[in-house]
Each structure stands twice: as structure tokens, then as C-alpha cells.
Amino acid sequence: MSLDAGPRLQAGLAELRRVPDILGATIARRDGILIASALAKSMDPRKIAAMAAAIVGTSEMAATEMGLGVFNQSIVDTHIGKLLATGAGEEAILITMVRNDANMGLVLLSVDRAVQSIAAILDAESEVSAEATV
């Protein structure tokens, strides 16, 4: 990752964290490797990235097998809160921790904006890397 992409991704996570019902967020590669994180200190971002990638992988396979179309998002809903695992381009996922009583309209709008930004940053990063190897 370039020196420019890391701070831009962290800034996007910080902006997402300003939404009142969002408790934390992490960006991971689809293979579970942590890219960036803005979580509470009590949460292990590497474990969350790996587990969310497994959830997304299973959800993608299920959607394909059942003929439900392209995967968008998996939700783990507990009595305490929610974990949203949302595809962020070809290579990444955004994991968002949300209060159980959250304004989901605002949360989903904010997550959608963040996903678009993350995908754009990582796509630009991929293009730069591809040009550098040519």
C-alpha cells in the first residue's frame, strides 16, 4: 500500500466513526488480512478482519449457490449490537460495528458512502501498482 492510501483509508474510517450509532470500523482484504482499523481497544482488529472475511466468503458462496445474485452485505445481529460486513470493491470488505438500536437508514447510507470511497482508493492503488510493474 502506498504512503498516500493508508492515511486516506484511516480518514475514511474516522469519518465513519463520527456517525453516532457506529462503534467501530475495519477494512480488510477478502482473504482476512487487516488493512486499516478504527475499533475500540477491547477489540482485536486482526481477529475481526479474519472472521468477517470468513463470513463474507461463506455468504458469497451461499448467494451464488442459491442464485441470489451478487453479494452485498452480511449482518451478524446480537442482543448487544451488529456487525455489518460489506463488500468494498473487488479486494476488500468494510466491517462496521453498530449499536443494536441504531438508525439503520443513516448507518447504511454512511456505510455505502464509505464503501464507495474505499473501493475508489484501493482501485487507484491497484492501478498505480500495475503501472509500476510494467
Image (cartoon, rainbow, N blue to C red):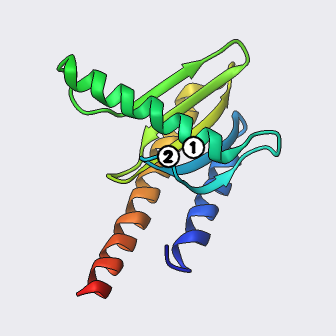
Observer able to see residue 27: yes
Q: Amino acid at mark 1?
A: Ala
Quarter of the rendering containing residue 59: top left
Which x, y percent locates residue 99?
Answer: 70, 26
Say the numbered circle drawn on residue 74: none
Quadrant in which the C terminus is drawn: bottom left
Q: Residue at x 56, y 80 (%)?
A: 3
Which x, y percent locates residue 75?
Answer: 50, 24
Instruction: Answer whether labels 1 and 2 touch (C-beta < 8 Å).
Output: yes
Upstream in sequence: badge 1 or badge 2: 2
Residue 112 located left or right of residue 72: right
Q: Residue at x 45, y 27 (%)?
A: 74
Under circle 1, the secondary element is: helix
User: Circle 2 is placed at which residue position?
Assistant: 32
Crowding at dot 2, Cα within 10 Å, few <14 / some 14-19 / many 20+, comes out as: many
Q: Amino acid at mark 2?
A: Gly
Under circle 2, the secondary element is: loop
Q: Residue at x 53, y 31 (%)?
A: 84
Say the numbered circle drawn on residue 49: 1
Crowding at dot 1, Cα within 10 Å, few <14 / some 14-19 / many 20+, comes out as: many
Placement of 87 over or under 21, stated as above or below: below
Observer able to see residue 108: no
